[in-house]
Image: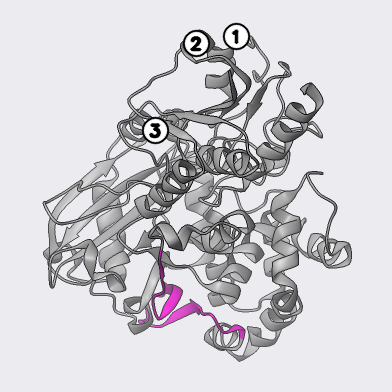
Amino acid sequence: MLDAVVVGAGPNGLTAAVELARRGHSVAVFEARSTVGGGARTEELTLPGFRHDPCSAAHPLGINSPAFRALPLERYGLEWLHAELPMAHPFLDGSAAVLSRSVGETAASFGPRDAGAYRRLIEPFVPKWDALVRDFMALPLTALPRDPVTLARFGLAGLPPSTWLMRRFRDDRARALFAGLVAHVIAPLGGLATGAVGMVFALAAHARGWPVARGGSQSISDALAAHLRDLGGAVHTDYEVKRLDDLPPARAYVFDTSPTALARIAGLGRAYEGYRYGASVFKIDYALDGPVPWTAKEARAAGTVQVAASSREVATALRAASREGKAPDPPFLITVQPSVVDPTRAPEGKHVFWAYGHVPNGWEGDLTDAVERQLERFAPGFRDRVLARATAGPPQLAERNANYVGGDIACGAASGLQLMLRPKLTLSPYRTPHPAIFLCSSATPPGPGVHGMSGHNAAKAVWRRLREAS
């Protein structure tokens, strides 16, 4: 009998398996698709030689993850590559605000009226980032806080809605960039703790940047899987699990799936009937004949580019997709241009680029024209660079990854109490009504992103179960 079986080979499932195997437990992972990866994959979606990331591409939480940093993933081929700027937010006048590794450079890009406000908000936390991120990503109650005072100060600043926090800024340059940071979790700007979301993404950039993985996000998943195999674990692909009886006997079962899929497979009935899924995205992967012709020079040097003319435009787009049930026009776009720093992603002189805008859960329309009209506002001539495109709306995203219910790439709405208390109000979010069954997906704290911390935290709960049962 195995000690643990993990269902789903996304970053969280693989991290949970690695953590268990590191402690001498026998572990096997079962993945429905032909390759490991979940939200961290790389595929030729458009033309031969153009390697795209179907979901996550830039990894501020990955390089800062305490779980990943404790593992020898570089030994298995993972290499982080940094663009000159982690992120830029261009404006229609050809200027841009930037998120730089330097707090000072970032503050200066907001202009003199807001530079001091940004420094006062962010600088106190930069020297204590490692302790803060460990405490923040290990909550709730998987470990005692290492720096409770800093965590409390961060909570006082970040727990209110981001709209409150942004009142510190007098001009819209800072507000627009910060609103875009919050939008990465597809949460309305006025929600509880959305200020903390923006602060975490900003601090992550100042601490270690917003890199891409050389060769694509698949490198992260492949490194985790290779490390697991070296520890004696097994990975089985092309193995769809429809019920618990499809799996071999084990002392514990760990699911890197949506809560509703777990309930269906494990026969847990209505255990997660109150869990909410949020808005989706419409994503386009591009093969380009050259770099994106951004008007703002800062955007040409950035790995990630946020695209909206103002903070109001960001807020309006999020509200339309999350609350009004319609596709925004113009959409707020999050874009990543990996080949700015990684030439292995495309043939010589060519580029890969992706962009997504937010749409309602399950939306079946086509946002391509709206996306490209928005890009043309900030990068005139963009359409002339397009060699090929691959589009994916909510139905296609859900088909590629069963965790994306209705196309929700966050595996659950990151709004209200569910932003922090996932998948339900409990002190043991990784445990389920069955004592031998656990949940480790991004439906559990600390939530969405390629960081493995949900798997790391769930593994702790599994260790306790195995110790109690031995």
Residue drawn at 27 percent across, 39 percent down: 366
- 289 sits to left or right of 220: left
Q: Secondary structure beneath disc 3? A: loop
Q: Is residue 284 visible?
A: yes
* Of callouts 2 and 3, the N-terminal one: 2
86 in magenta: yes
Q: Which mark is residue 243?
A: 2
- 111 sits to left or right of 52: right
Q: Secondary structure beneath disc 1? A: loop
* Of callouts 3 and 1, the N-terminal one: 1
Q: Tag 1: Cα neighbours inside 10 Å, few (<14), some, or many (≥20)?
A: few
The reply to whether dot 3 and dot 1 touch (C-beta < 8 Å) is no
In this figure, which colouring scheme has been used for the structure?
one colour
Task: Find the distance from the CA under tag 2 to the CA under tag 1.
Answer: 8 Å
Q: Tag 2: Cα neighbours inside 10 Å, few (<14), some, or many (≥20)?
A: some
Near-viewer residue (96 or 230): 230
- Tell which tag, 3 or 1, sits nearer the viewer: 1
User: Which three-letter amino acid code belongs to the residue tagged 3?
Assistant: Asn
User: Which three-letter amino acid code belongs to the residue tagged 2?
Assistant: Arg
Q: Which residue is mark 1?
A: 267
- 92 sits to left or right of 428: left
* Of callouts 2 and 1, the N-terminal one: 2
Q: Which residue is mark 3?
A: 401
The reply to whether dot 2 and dot 1 touch (C-beta < 8 Å) is yes
Q: Is residue 92 visible?
A: no
**Where does the magenta region start and end?**
79-103
- Image coordinates of residue 196 in percent, x first then y, are 70, 59
430 in magenta: no
Residue drawn at 12 percent across, 51 percent down: 47
